[in-house]
Image: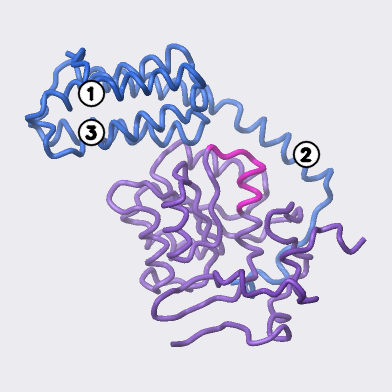
Amino acid sequence: MLQRLKNQLREIKPAEFRRMEADAVKVTSDLLGMFQDNFRRTIEAIDGLTAHPQYEDAAWRGRLYRLSHNLKGLGGTFNYGLVTTVGDSLCSLIQNDALPGDRSLQRRIVAHAAALRAILQFDLKGDGGREGEELLATLRMEPATGQGR
Amino acid sequence: MSSTVPQSGRDLARFTLPVKRKVYAYDMPLLDLSELRVIVIDDNEFATILMRRLLGVMRVAHVATCSDALEADAAIRQSKADLVIVDIDMPGRNGIEVVHDIRHGQVGIAKDVCILVASAHVDIEHVEQARSEGANWIVAKPLSFRTLYDGVARAILDDRPFIDSSSYVGPCRRTKAVPLADPDSDRRKRPDAAK
């Protein structure tokens, strides 16, 4: 693998590298805004789906899965680890074969959508700290408490 | 079993690069990457935009992207990439499978192309899977300029012998075989040790 790259690489000066780092900040500064817009639209789409649930419909589940998966990737790319965690968990729930007939799973889907809204509303970056822990704890408690819809 | 494992320190000399390689876990040399050809395989639109922009700042001249892992093989062939950056979790076909297929010659490019896995899933299970399938390096998302650069540099400067056997294809994983007393080994020296 190295033979092909041999003689194609040269070292650059630290000052040049620092300029690149500064340029990187400039060229990526607008992406966070794009991410937040996309995040908001995706959550609205998830809300739209969960407002009219069709758990038996594979196409409906597929749409919900794609949106959740997209959020997962977005969270990972823009330091919203909590979004990735909740999105990942939501993807697992949607893939559960028992979902069409299991009210507990269905309640958890709704709870996950609410958790994503909360992350957006309170702008919980990274793992969300203590608030993030509390949010994840409510998701874990959801099936036992049966407080979902 | 065919293997390209060097049998001695002398054999290793042919892997020498024009820039001095630093050992793992320390800073990478600062490289001009303008001759590098890269393909990014990631189903997330924002991840590909971010990486394309960051690689552009690094002056990587050729950056191709592919958002559908099922079509990645053709895209990789077409890109003639020196480095494949691949996400793990993608619908239809995950990045670990892409790495496996590249290393086993099922993609139609050289098996020993540099592979960097960039994923938010960097738990031990995924890291072990990526390593077992022959990835050169793994970086954790979210990516910054520095983390992406570091991953790219580590992947392309990876001078471990390439193993092509029936049970494993990829960079040699036997790091423990390097003796501590070996004067040719830089794996356990600090970069400033010679000063």
For marks 1 and 2, the one nearer the N-term is 2
Question: Residue under circle 3?
Answer: A93
Category of crowding for the residue at label 3, using alpha-carbon neighbours closer than 10 angstroms: few (below 14), some (14–19), many (at least 20): some
Q: Calculate the distance from the C-alpha at mark 1 to the C-alpha at mark 2.
A: 48 Å
Q: Is residue B149 above or below residue A11?
A: above
Q: Calculate the distance from the C-alpha at mark 3 to the C-alpha at mark 1.
A: 8 Å
Q: Which secondary structure dominates the residues rendered in magenta?
A: helix
Horizontal and vertical percent position of residue A78: 51, 31
Which chain letter matches label 1?
A: A
Judging depth in this view, the residue of A102 and B45 nearest the camera is A102
Q: Give the structural element (helix, strand or loop) at label 1.
A: helix
- Amino acid marked by disc 1: Arg
- Amino acid marked by disc 2: Arg
The answer to whether the residue labelled 1 contacts the one labelled 2, judged by CB atoms less than 8 Å apart, is: no
Chain A rendering hue? blue
Where, quadrant-wise, is the C terminus of chain B in this rendering? bottom right
Which chain letter matches label 2?
A: A
Q: Which chain is purple?
A: B
Horizontal and vertical percent position of residue B181: 77, 74
Q: Same chain for marks 3 and 1?
A: yes
